[in-house]
Image (cartoon, rainbow, N blue to C red):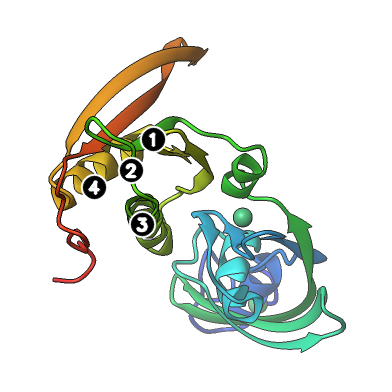
Amino acid sequence: MFCVECGKDGPTVEGLCPSCFRKRNPLVHPPESIDAVVCVDCQRLESGGGWVRVEVETAIPMLLRERVPTDPRAGRVTFTHVSRAEDAKNFGLSVKAAARISDIEIVESFRTRLRVQQGLCPTCNRRRSNYYEGILQVRAVDRPLTGGERIRLVAFVQEAIARRSAKGEEVFVSKVEEVRGGADVYLSSNRVARTVARELADAFRGTVGSSPKLFGQKDGKDLYRVTYVVRIPRGTPSGGRDPGTP
Ligand SMILES: [Zn+2]
Ligand SMILES: [Zn+2]
């Protein structure tokens, strides 16, 4: 076979020798810069899959895969890079991209700059505006909670939320209010408020009641803020069970 471009004899792809094919079909279209957004509150980094807990340096291969346009005929393009921090927010990147198109091994090098910008993820944005969907009220039956009980019950709820948040669930405690008879814990997720109310009642042998209140609409659906009240009985065992330990 002869290359239609340069006339060289040998294997061809789409009529071109490997070297002419590469010239005609760049593997990557490197952007001048790649912007990464890091949340100022939680330090998570925005990626195509959401906000992830990862160091910027560690995230560079992922950012390259997400942000550098590549020839769609290439299967998985692998990037290797060397980064040089110019300051806290700018990294110079020397990148090698490698892939196969048809039977041709292609390796291309380019330089780009990674710019780290500050942003606010949706969860932290909600947290800052004291967003909540559910209220978990901790109370006792026929009496006010003692100070010690109130501290234990609120701590139970806060730990249950912290465990979920550590696993990557988008949930947080908006605020805790001490009220007559107990405390009100405001939670960003109605679903989690319901589950934690159940866990709390199970751990302290209490009961759960609930009352929904319509507070708006989203995409034609009614939105409710639900108040869950957990009442613990008289003579409750002092500690309660910690569900975090088997
Ligand atoms: Zn050629
Ligand atoms: Zn955040």
The CA distance from mark 4 to mark 2 is 15 Å
On residue 145, the disc is 2
Q: Dividing the picture into quarters, in which one does residue 102 lie? A: bottom left
Instruction: Give the x, y percent position of residue 180.
Output: 45, 33
- The kind of residue on which mark 2 rests is Leu
Residue at mark 3 = 148
Q: Earlier in the sequence, mark 4 or mark 2?
A: 2
Query: Contact (CB < 8 A) between labels 3 and 1?
Result: no
Q: Earlier in the sequence, mark 3 or mark 1?
A: 3
Residue at mark 1 = 181
Residue at mark 4 = 200
Q: Quadrant of ligand 2?
A: bottom right
Point 30% across, 31% down: residue: 229
Query: Contact (CB < 8 A) between labels 2 and 3?
Result: no
Query: Contact (CB < 8 A) between labels 1 and 2?
Result: yes
Point 69% across, 66% down: residue: 24
The CA distance from mark 3 to mark 1 is 12 Å
- The kind of residue on which mark 4 rests is Leu
Q: Earlier in the sequence, mark 4 or mark 3?
A: 3
136 or 126: nearer the viewer? 136
Q: Can residue 222 be spotted in the picture?
A: no
